[in-house]
Image (cartoon, grey):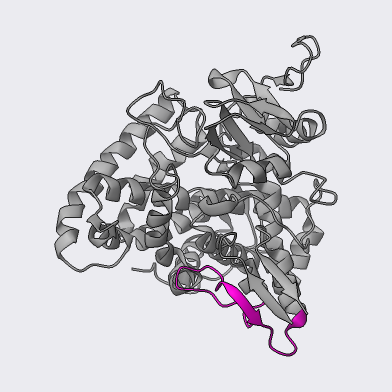
Amino acid sequence: MRVTVDRDRCSGHVRCAALAPQVYRLDEEGYAAAGAHPVPPGQERPAERGALACPEGAISVSR
Amino acid sequence: MSVDPSVDTGAGAPPSIEFDHYSPQYRDNWQQIADENLARCPVARSGTYGGFWLVSDYASVSRVIRDDATFTSTHNMDDPSDPRQGIVIPPNPMLQVPMEFDPPLYNVYRRMLNPYFSPPAARALEPFVRQAVDALLDKVCATGRMDLVLDLGNPVPALATMKLVGLPLDDWERFAEPMHGIVSHPAGGPEYLRCMNALQELGNALGALVPGLREREADGLLSGLAKATVNDQPLSDGEVVLIALLVMQGGVDTTTALLANTLWWLEEHPEQRQRLIEEPALLEHATEEFLRIFTPVPALARTVTEDVVVGGQQMCAGDRVLMSFSAANRDPEVFDDPAEARLDRFPNPHASFGLGIHRCIGSNFARSWFQIMLRGVLDRMPDYAIDRDATRRNESIGIINGFFNMPATFTPSEPRGVPMPE
């Protein structure tokens, strides 16, 4: 599974990292690191919830 | 405040309402008014304050707030005849830097400020906030009485904000009092003007600190701003002061309002209070739900830059637009049973910190301070009972939906011997 963060939409709400800190890393400004990231094994459910929690719809999940 | 069917505005004319977000009627009935507007006229024209569009539904609020080119935040302080009068209706007498800026300049300021407000920055301040909460509760716990707003909800965010900005903690009331006055009284009224003058004097005092801070090392945002550059230019003294005042205005009162509304609601719902005490892990989702249902900052404004259709209504360049976050947060298209507070609601894409690039920069601090204060009360005075007859809501909720005071009683307990932080 991979998650992709759209930096143009991410506005730093940090809901993703609050629910899945091992999946969503933050940059020094507190915004989710942009681009595609592999989901560590066992983190699939938090990754999906983190994406769902984003009020900007900035995160897509692909298998 | 509802649609007036007696006003025949002609075929195709927008629904017309008389909406006054500073009125006592709105303060006392804001949920009902939001629900009516959502059902009947999610994008409506109001004649108050020179006329503006009131946008209530979630989709239209999202549309407006995410399109900074068509809906500008710019505030032309030099020319009141310019329709671009910023993010408050009626316009704020002080420029809000950088909230009342647009891209690309806005982004430069925002990137410069973001590191001061990041999750690690919020975590770093947590020991200070915990100590402040413990020390303040120590002062009242043995008496069995406290004011949840005046003894806790006001001082904690104010002290934390002073610390963040790098100002003497003892001065917190000098800043907090006029800031609280500005948001709890109707814009333009005598109390509001007195507080605005007081704030301008405090701004002058801050400005006097800036030249020295340009030279010497010191902790806090004010020192950082004094040394910061935007597009390779140092900030002017005036800009440093305006940014610091905006940060303080944002930090004082907003989290206070969230805490007060939450404590009021939990007292009305003892089974939910018990659940939150027994399941601390619930606080993560519950915080989002309290933010949604109480929406401490109920609305902010934009100005239309080119003709555009929103929610089926034709807006014209120069029109003012008020985005009702509190209504969007009750939109049944997005939230099931929106009037119900569900502590485990998920997902919960509320608009209480705004959406898009102007998202509240203090949101990481707000969540942290709110949770530490709420835990403090639930831990040390879990059976608090509010004296509802002696509690006063803000006179107006046009800027912040909060409380002036909230006296309460509880079973006394021993102080923990925690001194105020320095």
Question: Could you tell me residue B34's position as x and y percent?
Answer: 73, 35
Name the residue nearer the viewer: A62 or B182. Answer: A62
Residue shown at the point (28%, 51%) measured from the top left:
B240
* Vertical relation: B336 (above or below) B405: below
Question: Could you tell me residue B55's position as x and y percent?
Answer: 67, 34
Residue B401 location, quadrant: top right
* Vertical relation: B418 (above or below) B67: below
Residue B388 location, quadrant: top right
Tell me the quadrant of the picture where the C terminus of chain B can be found.
bottom left
**B392 left or right of B60?**
left
Residue shown at the point (36%, 58%) measured from the top left:
B162
Tell me, yes or no, if residue B385 can be seen here: no
Span colored in magenta: A20-44
* Vertical relation: B237 (above or below) B417: above
Total labels: the figure holds: 0
**B292 left or right of B239?**
right
Q: Main secondary structure of the magenta part?
A: loop
Question: Could you tell me residue B386's position as x and y percent?
Answer: 66, 49
Question: Could you tell me residue B99's position as x and y percent?
Answer: 44, 46
**B402 left or right of B228?**
right
Name the residue nearer the viewer: B307 or B228. Answer: B307
Question: Residue extending furthest front?
Answer: B307
* Vertical relation: B303 (above or below) A62: above
In the image, residue A43 lies in the stretch drawn in magenta: yes
Residue shown at the point (46%, 49%) measured from the top left:
B250
In the image, residue B290 lies in the stretch drawn in magenta: no
**B268 left or right of B48?**
right
